[in-house]
Image (tube, rainbow, N blue to C red):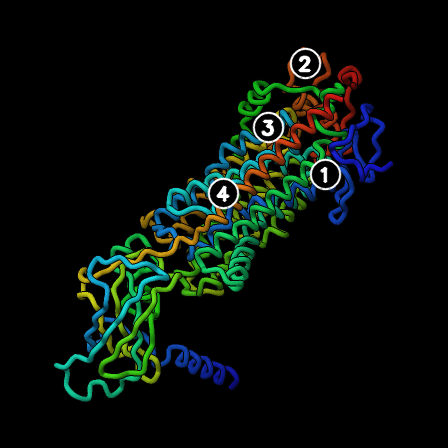
Amino acid sequence: MGDSSKTSLQVEPSDAQATRFKMPVDSEQKATEFWLFSFAAPHMKAFHLSWFSFFCCFVSTFAAPPLLPLIRDNLNLTTTDIGNAGIASVSGAVFARVAMGTACDLVGPRLASASLILLTTPAVYCTSAINSASSYLLVRFFTGFSLASFVSTQFWMSSMFTPPKVGVANGIAGGWGNLGGGATQLIMPLVYELIHHIGSTSFTAWRIAFFIPGLMQTLSAIAVLALGQDLPNGNYRKLEKAGDKHKDSFGNVFYHAVTNYRAWILGLTYGYCFGVELTIDNIVAEYFYDKFNVNLRTAGMIAASFGLANIVSRPGGGFLSDWISTRYGMRGRLWSLWVVQSIGGVLCIVLGLMHNLSAAIAVMLLFSFFVQAACGFTFGVVPFVSRRSLGLISGMTGGGGNVGAVITQLIFFTGSRYSKETGITLMGVMILCCTLPILIIYFPQWGGMFCGPRADATAEDYYAAEWSDEEKAKGYHSQSVKFAENSVREGGRRRRPPLTVPVEATPTHV
Amino acid sequence: MAALLSTQAAALLLLCYLGPSAAVLFSSLPRSLGITASPTPGQVLHAGVDEITVTWALNQSLPAGTDSGYKKVKVTLCYAPVSQTDRGWRKTDDHLKKDKTCQFKMATRPYAATGTVTYTVERIIPTATFFVRAYVLDSDDTEVAYGQTTDPKKTTNLFDIVGVTGRHASLDIAAACFSAFSVVALAFFFVVEKKKAKK
């Protein structure tokens, strides 16, 4: 079958069972393996489309910081202006991520992410036309909305990959996307130098440079629309028309997300791994420049290396989360998340206390590995919190990440209350405190950090509880049941062989 | 033995690094030159267009032979305090190596008791308030004296420069076109999707 040549614009077969895939799949048609260097449709193709489009969003959002020495003179900015714009760049995505989660639940990740990315590219292009502190703040604010495409990335991966592989898929997609924050510190100065060399004056060359991230964003979003599809069996609209997928309502999705306490805890803790990462992206170049008197290019390279660690650190977190769950199940995922993020907090405290350049760089690199791995570990847990409201919960977690970035920048890095090194140390203390709530997370069917699972609880009960009896009677929760069956391994090694599902509880499949 | 050698090498390197230019403090420099610059107080100059003419002269009241070590004169454009507030990258520091007040070199000339330079304001100069300062350098390129157009508190005789915006009509048009293309592309895909779904 010419599956790899099908695009989303062609009519999908109405009989979902007839589709055959290059990759091995489970009962939900999700891939059970992850082939990094393959473009096999639809699973790996979706992976590459989503991580690259998310990467482009990060490049655009953090395109300004490496060029600030020019922009601040061109626009006559003050430190306060720069700080405010930095906060604005990450605050837009707080609500955008939550909204994105809902959009994914309702219209699918492909349309949701492409719409967001294409609608924010005007802000990137218009950065070339700004002429004041307020216009600078506005373009950074609106460009920052594109970071919400993180949610669609995670949602898409959770829709395409089976639970044992979802950690590594989410980790690499998220990590290689976050990579954009580091890559841009190298890309933008390079593009600027090139344009300046060709002949433009400095104050024009940086403006032209912004067309590069803008174009990258536009083209990657068009690729998502043309080449991607929401689910292994097709796109939302087609599946809904064919009756294969029930069209859920915002009210229900919202209710089941906000009443799940685990979503709130994960949102808070994500603010202190990912949020801290965003804060560091915004301040680290200046920190090394001021404290150690390195020149701007060196400071930029150090700043870039923090973000570049994402190539392996976040995927490593996702991979380790999956690996630990083969042995210890969900309890292993929770423990490892808490340990890794706490170590990140300790390293953050130490970073602020380093007075020697090489020691500071070494600690910073270690810190980057742990804090980014913690992000990977977090999204090893998120796909299991809810099946019905997966998108919104991914959005709440992602939004919480940005809230963390806003809060840490506001408290520790605005104004001159704390020196930057004191701010970094105190931020480390806050990481330790805000990671503690993970101790409270408890899944009845798998347990929590300190408590084992309840003997009579099953994954099926947990996910089916999100649907009312009438909805269950209509079979709307069929996807949740399949998911529950596929996530039996989260019980850990001691729970094998898997629990058999009592016959009377098996629903009629569509 | 090797340890001893390596510590000696390290000490030498450290000395070379610190070198003779170690910790020259601005407050230690004598104000030997009298400087006048062509802009009148409060005048607004435009980058890329206007010129500044700077004339310096050795202070006659100084004893003869003061200028025996003077080799070069470096004329610089310096930020006034009003353009330094809330901008840490332009901070004044007494250690000249760390000082960021005077970031733009207008001209460097071999030392003479009097001299004039004319400088066209470059297009890299930002919008800010400035004064002119000239450093006298010795043969090691270390600052040994200075002169400036303003008083020690840097409040008098300041002038403004308006920098180029860097904006061009072509850039604005290109930005508008690319933005429109992105939005239209999205609309196009939506329409196509709806048509396919209807089939």
Of labels 4 and 3, earlier in sequence is: 3
Residue closer to the observer: A184 or A368:
A184
Q: Nearer the viewer, mark 4 or mark 1?
A: 1
> Which element carries disc 4, helix, strand or loop?
helix
Residue closer to the observer: A420 or A459:
A420
Q: Which image quarter holds the C terminus of chain A?
A: top right
User: In the image, are marks 4 and 3 on the same chain?
Assistant: yes
Q: Residues within 10 Å of mark 4 (few under 14, many from 20)?
A: many
Q: Residue at x 59, y 28 (%)?
A: A103
Residue at the spot of label 3: A103
How far apart are the two marked residues, 2 and 3, measured between alpha carbons? Answer: 21 Å
Q: Residue at x 22, y 61 (%)?
A: B158
Marks 2 and 3 in Cβ contact (< 8 Å): no
Q: Nearer the viewer, mark 2 or mark 1?
A: 1
Residue at the spot of label 1: A227
Instruction: Judge whether A42 appears above or below A478 on screen.
Output: below
Residue at the spot of label 4: A275
